[in-house]
Image: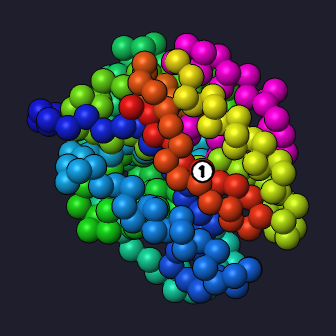
Amino acid sequence: MASHKARFPALYIPHGGGPCFFMTWSMGPVDTWQRMGEWLQQAGSFGGETPAAIVVVSAHWEAPVATVTSGPAPGLIYDYYGFPAHTYELTYPAPGDPALAARVRNCLDDAGIASAPDPERGFDHGVFIPFKLMYPEASIPIVQLSLLASLDPMQHIDIGRALAPLRNEGVLIVGSGMSYHNLPRMMGGGTAIGASEDFDGWLQSTCALDAQTREEQLCSWESAPSAREAHPREEHLLPLMVAAGAGGAGSGRREFTDRVMGATVSAFAFE
């Protein structure tokens, strides 16, 4: 990959609820997702520097081994249900990057992590929905990397560590999920407030720790306040583990927070 001056933070972003930013929201106030959308619109700006490419881990793809999109022109996977018809016609023609996919696999191999290519896989909504706001021109090459079906936090931190060298090559590493993801509670009209605030406070303090302590705490995330209430299943939290691992010795900080459908939801960056 060509050299690139900028070194970008590793990000953990919220990707919202389905295609929420591109429709009139009817399950609550119409501005429910407005602040998150506005934050995403500026989250991809780094002092005028643009990533040479993006590697993204979404909550919506799990595989037995770390699997990368390796095709040159991935399509879109409309993996949301019951939304207006026009949201299944959204486009995001960002190119893939077979060379970067191979580079990702080399990084994983160097770390002893098994991987596989998937030349047919497209981008799920955890990728194209937030990126339509962050990089609406759809010109930056993107490689998506799966979560591991094991859902093991340390394995995802290890994946992030393996990918960290890409940050010195102008690649932006993004974990796309939701820091609180208990949909029945969120639909319950404010019943998520206490648990989400407890868990979010733990996340904020944990991400700010030194790397070793941070990783130890993240691996024990189930012991955090209201952990399983915040994440009955952890697929929306694990992209944060990848971002934290890619952060290396750099500090972590909360970049954005808002209350959405009764839950506190945040984004984090790791320098």
Viewer-proximal residue among 70 and 228: 228
Quadrant of the rendered structure where residue 25 is?
bottom right
Q: How many marks?
A: 1
Q: Is residue 13 above or below residue 89?
A: above
Q: Quadrant of residue 186?
A: bottom right
**What secondary structure is found at the residue carrying circle 1?**
strand
Residue 65 seen anywhere in this rendered image of the structure: no
**Circle 1 is placed at which residue position?**
266
> Which amino acid, mark 1?
Ser
Residue 215 counted in the magenta span? yes
> In x, y percent, where is residue 143?
36, 45
Q: Identify whether 27 is placed above or below 148.
A: below
Question: Does the magenta segment cover residue 185?
Answer: no
Image quadrant holding the N terminus, namely top left
Of residue 12 and residue 210, the one placed in the foreground of this image is 210
Q: Which residue shows up at 64% across the image and 74% down it?
A: 32
Image quadrant occupied by the C terminus: top left
Figure colour scheme: rainbow
Residue at x 62%, y 60% (from the top left corner): 258
Q: Quadrant of residue 240?
A: top right
Q: Residue at x 30, y 24 (%)?
A: 165
Report the residue at 85% width, 70% height from top: 189
Badge 1 crowding class, 10 Å Cα cut-off, few under 14, some 14 to 19, many 20 or more, is many
Q: Is residue 89 left or right of residue 98?
A: right
Q: Main secondary structure of the magenta part?
A: helix
User: Residue 252 in the image: x percent, y percent?
Assistant: 49, 32
Q: Which range is magenta? A: 211-240
Q: Is 121 on the left or on the right of 5, as rendered?
A: right
- Judge whether residue 187 can be spotted in this image: yes
Position in image of residue 6 (x %, y %): 20, 38
Seen in the image, is 167 located left or right of residue 242? Answer: left
